[in-house]
Image (cartoon, rainbow, N blue to C red):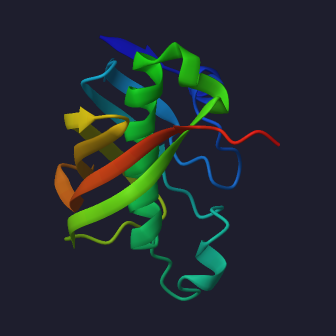
Amino acid sequence: MESLDIQAIRATLPHRYPMLLVDRVLELEPGVRIKALKNVTINEPFFPGHFPHFPVMPGVLIVEALAQASAIVAYRSDPDAMGGRKLFLFAGIDEARFKRQVVPGDSLILESTFLKGMRGVGRWAVRASVDGQVACEATLLSALRPTPEA
């Protein structure tokens, strides 16, 4: 079982501020599953507009954080993909449910398990939770594709 700090995450994912939404990997089985952490702070760039008097992390960004955690699983099982040499793209989001608001000060636990895949398309069971309470559950579909040449 691996763990990754922010430097190893940055070496794995092509995302950068303000879109890098994984702070630490707590547990990783490449190609199988991940448990990661996103520390949600009042300094997030989306809070001034969502919502100024009651800041709530947008659901779409919770799903993005789950997708990034899933991408770490995929990238770490394919070293040729790391660092942006391949792109982990959304192909679909099914059965997404939001059950708890995520607010500044929360430690968002991101969990993703690879379900099945074929020809670069994968299916993932994902869950985000805070203090053991489910904030979001969904099934994600992804496509791992070569990065287009610039």
What residue is at 49 percent from the left and 63 percent from the top?
Answer: 104
Q: Quadrant of the C terminus?
A: top right
| Quadrant hosting residue 76 | top left
| Quadrant hosting residue 36 | top left
User: On screen, 33 above or below 3?
Assistant: below
Q: Where is residue 96 in the image (x, y as percent from the top left)?
A: 23, 67
User: On screen, 82 above or below 42?
Assistant: above
Left or right: where 135 falls relative to 145: left
Q: Where is residue 23 in the image (x, y as percent from the top left)?
A: 53, 37
- Confirm whether residue 108 shows in the render: no
Q: Quadrant of the N terminus?
A: top left
Q: Position of residue 48 (x, y in %)?
A: 65, 79
As drawn, which residue projects farthest toward the front? 119
In this view, the residue in front, 114 or 51, is 114
Q: Where is residue 57 in the image (x, y as percent from the top left)?
A: 46, 69
What residue is at 38 percent from the left and 57 percent from the top?
Answer: 91
In this view, the residue in front, 101 or 61, is 61
Left or right: where 126 falls relative to 46: left
What residue is at 37 percent from the left and 12 percent from the top?
Answer: 2
